[in-house]
Amino acid sequence: MRQEDEIFTLPIPTPFPVGDINCYVLRTDSENILIDCGPDTEQAWQAMQDGLQKSD
């Protein structure tokens, strides 16, 4: 990882007793890499979209 790369944490809600999980976005100069996108629920999808917009 280069010094100019950034890692963002996105808290994502789950319907499970464990509660929220963290997804990670590695932002480089050439691409964004999403690590662990969370469960396939509408609430998780919306939280990810909201978090990605805030990290711009």
Image (tube, rainbow, N blue to C red):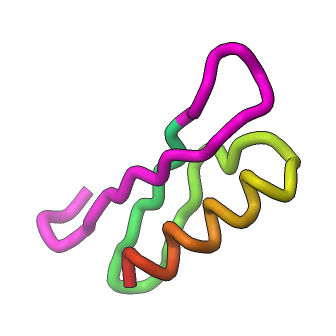
How far across and down, in percent of the image, does residue 31 sit? 49, 79
Q: Which residue is farthest top?
A: 17
Is 7 or 28 nearer to us in this picture?
7
Q: What stretch is highlighted in magenta?
A: 1-21
- Magenta stretch prevailing secondary structure: loop
Query: Considering the image in quadrants, where does the C terminus appear?
Result: bottom left
Above-or-below relation of 45 to 21: below
Apparent side of residue 55 relative to residue 17 in the rendered image (left or right)? left
Q: Is residue 13 magenta?
A: yes
Residue at 41% in and 61% down: 26
The residue sitting at 79% across, 30% down in the picture is: 15
Residue drawn where x is 86% and y is 49% of the image: 41
Residue at 63% in and 60% down? 47
**Quarter of the N terminus within the rendering:** bottom left
**Residue 3 falls in which quadrant of the image?**
bottom left
Q: Is 43 situated left or right of 7 in this image? A: right
The location of residue 18, given as percent across then percent down, is 64, 16
Q: Please, is residue 44 above or below residue 16 in the view?
A: below
Q: Position of residue 4 (x, y in %)?
A: 17, 73
